[in-house]
Amino acid sequence: MQKAPNYVIISLVFFILIGVGFAYSYFFYPNNQPIQCVVKSYTGHNCPTCGFSRAFSYYTHLQFNEGKLYNSLSWNVFLFFLFQFLWRGSIVIYFLITRKLVSVIVIKSDLLISISFFLLAFLPIILNF
């Protein structure tokens, strides 16, 4: 059996981690989140990511408008993780079916697109801190 290349292993790890995050968001309903915001618990003030867990819970239940009400910055981050989840899963499935790695052009494009999407999703949060 052929050993999976590092790119596929990294994609599998991200696929699993993001999947666990989505499962957490799905099973812990918006008003039943067990983890509180660390920044808010220490300072008493909301941080730019306050409400993300509740918003993600709504998003995973396909209640998009309700989720955006908790934190408008969460929508782009959710879309980033959804894209990454689907893309990483497709890379792993492609490798399992064909036993071939995607081309170098696809890997370089993936890097460029992922970094760009990451910056688009997270830069507004970073600028609000």
Image (tube, rainbow, N blue to C red):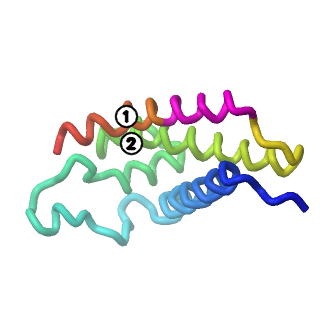
Amino acid type, residue under disc 1 in the picture: Leu
What residue did someone put label 2 on?
Answer: 66
Residue 40 picture quarter: bottom left
Marks 1 and 2 sit apart, C-alpha to C-alpha, by 25 Å
- Residue at the image point whose x is 22% and y is 66% from the top: 38
What residue did someone put label 1 on?
Answer: 119
- Asked if 121 appears above or below 2 in the picture, the reply is above
Q: Main secondary structure of the magenta part?
A: helix
Residue 94 picture quarter: top right
Q: Of callouts 1 and 2, which one flags the residue occurring earlier in the amino acid sequence?
A: 2
Q: Secondary structure at mark 1?
A: helix
Amino acid type, residue under disc 2 in the picture: Glu
Q: Residues within 10 Å of mark 1 (few under 14, many from 20)?
A: some
- Residue at the image point whose x is 10% and y is 56% from the top: 45
The span picked out in magenta is 103-114
Q: Is residue 73 magenta?
A: no
Residue sitting farthest toward the bottom: 34
Q: Secondary structure at mark 2?
A: helix
Q: Quadrant of the N terminus?
A: bottom right
